[in-house]
Amino acid sequence: MQIKILGCSGGIGAGMRTTSLLVDNDVLIDAGTGVGDLPLEALLKIDHIFVTHTHLDHIVSIPLLLDTVMGLRAEPITVHATLEVINILKQHVFNWLIWPNFNLIPDPATPFLRYNEIFVGNGVKINSKTITAVPANHVIPAVGYQIDSGKNSLVFTGDTAGSTNFWHDVNQIGNLKVLIIETAFSNAEAELAVLSKHLCPATLAEELVHLQSHPAVYITHLKPGEDATIMQEIAANPKTQHCKALLHQQIFNL
Ligand SMILES: [Zn+2]
Ligand SMILES: [Zn+2]
């Protein structure tokens, strides 16, 4: 199983893309601006999109992807998400006003967009990999994901503040090799991090104390302009100095 980071920034700008992970060539975890870098032939191979939550930096490419590939492929694209997230997408994105309702196009029996409701803790098997939602704690309904090749697992937190439920689930994973965890703000913005339910280096250190295994830990969702400061603060703390910044285009073979 290969996981390629299409975007891992908290914002946009030259060389920066918002959150998206491509698993093998058929699954996206979130669909931020990084999806737009893929050539058309790669876009055509995406069959499944697992959504952590509906903030725009994580979903902006879903409507555009559907519009780009539909008519060029026979099969629908399936969006996997919790019921709360599906309902937000239906009500606020695919509502004919922001974007057409591709769940009814070209006809309701064979739509371009299908939804699959997922539940935290219940794995969805896609070819040889299993994708399981794990708990998150954000300002709107959100989950993270465990992506398991059968041999190794990668866990991606999505956007989250601290969550004991998350660590409970992650500590059950016997083959965890990589943990991607967000740290959106620097310590100077700790208050904003709490309000928006993101992490800063200080709260990252408090969270990582709960981790009982020893995966490689990568930091994502750094706010542009604060990225160097955030990573310096993480490197300065003995509890987090092993963490590395996740890189745009980074590849994990698991
Ligand atoms: Zn968010
Ligand atoms: Zn975000």
Image (tube, rainbow, N blue to C red):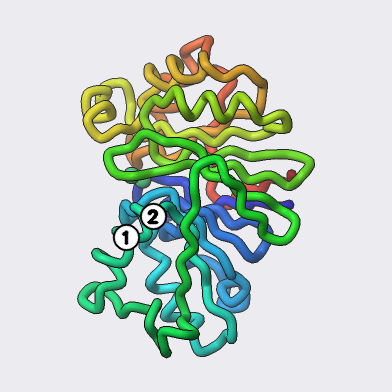
Residue drawn at point x = 50 percent, y = 56 percent: 50
Circle 2 — which element?
helix
Image quadrant for the C terminus? top right
Q: In which quarter of the image is ligand 2?
A: top left
Q: In this view, does 37 lie above or below 206?
A: below
Residue drawn at point x = 31 percent, y = 21 percent: 187
Q: Which of 54 and 189 is in front in this view?
A: 54
* Residue closest to the far right: 151
Circle 1 — which element?
helix
What residue sits right under mark 1 in the picture? 87
Quadrant hosting residue 95: bottom left
What residue sits right under mark 2 in the picture? 83
Residue drawn at point x = 34 percent, y = 52 percent: 84
> Is residue 223 visible to us here?
yes
Provide residue 140's location: percent of width, then percent of height: 29, 44
Quadrant hosting residue 105: bottom left
